[in-house]
Amino acid sequence: MRGDGKKMTDKLKIGHFEFSSRLFMGTGKYQDLEIQTKAVEASKTEVLTFAVRRLNIDNPDAPNFLERLDLSRYTLLPNTAGARTAEEAVRIARLAKASGLMHMVKVEVIGDQKTLLPDPIETIRATEMLVKEGFTVLTYTSDDPILAKRIEEAGAAAVMPGAAPIGSGLGILNPHYLSLIIEDAKVPVIIDAGLGAPSEACMAMELGADGILLNTAVASADNPVLMAEAFALAVESGRKGYLAGRIPKKRYASASSPIEGMIRA
């Protein structure tokens, strides 16, 4: 669809799911449930991700953000945050499935608590195991093009490379590697982690990313609701810019108005 000049009507397809919005929202770190609810609505997201281990599934009387939302408007994306091994990730995903929280899952297996970078071996194992069990798997990874390809080959329905360390707000540290992942992928690429400003989300979409997942950049902003709206606009703008096809970069200037045929004074 890139460069066809038509109004953008493309949908994001992940496995059997289809979305109009390309902005996924995390649900942690908000000051309170009211701000969280308003930010989610302002983002116009259709996908909400949350850590299964942080949701009191077994305690119906505990405060639950899901109760404040019209769940008919959202697809839930439980994640396996907190898992250190593939087996732990699979157990968490099974718990989410048994609780009726959807068959789509975000795999996250952290290998180092300082950097919060994923364990590549356990991440691939978890992806393979959950795909075999019939889950639609979206897998969080570093910005390593080789690892991203291995995750895709393991059966992931989407690859989710981080732009920078989780929660850092450092923005896109390696646009070249992200562009390589996007160029080579045959499944959607969702940029996940490290973005801090709407301009960075726009840049990621202009690189050709299929979507953006945010949490800290919105939840920890001075005005989370306004920031959620800003990111929604940035993601839409970046996608349209990518589809439109930017002009090639040139070493020297090129006049906007051709000088040939102009009347000389």
Image (spheres, rainbow, N blue to C red):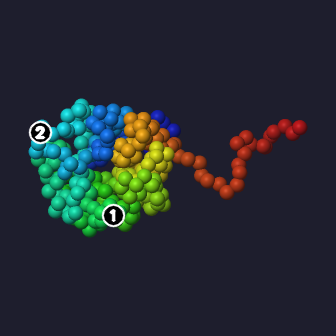
Give the vertical position of 63 relative to 183 (above or below).
above
Q: Are marks 1 and 2 in contact (CB under 8 Å)?
A: no
**Is residue 97 found left or right of 257 in the rendered image?**
left
* Kind of residue sitting beneath label 2: Pro
Q: Quadrant of the C terminus?
A: top right
Please name the residue that numbered disc 1 is placed on.
Answer: 114
User: In which quadrant of the rendered view does residue 230 lie?
Assistant: top left
* Residue at left offset 11%, top offset 39%: 60
Q: What is the number of callouts on the image?
A: 2
Which residue in the protein does label 2 denote? 60
> What x and y, as percent, mark residue 250?
65, 54
Find numbered disc 1 in the image and state the secondary structure of the residue it sits on.
loop
Q: Is residue 170 left or right of residue 155?
A: right
Q: Earlier in the sequence, mark 1 or mark 2?
A: 2
Residue at 47% across, 52% down: 207
> Tag 2, which secondary structure?
loop
Q: What x and y, as percent, mark residue 249? A: 61, 53
Q: Which quadrant, please, contains the N terminus?
A: top left
Residue 191 visible somewhere in the drawing: yes
Q: CA distance from mark 1 to mark 2?
A: 34 Å
- Residue 129 at x, y = what percent? 18, 61
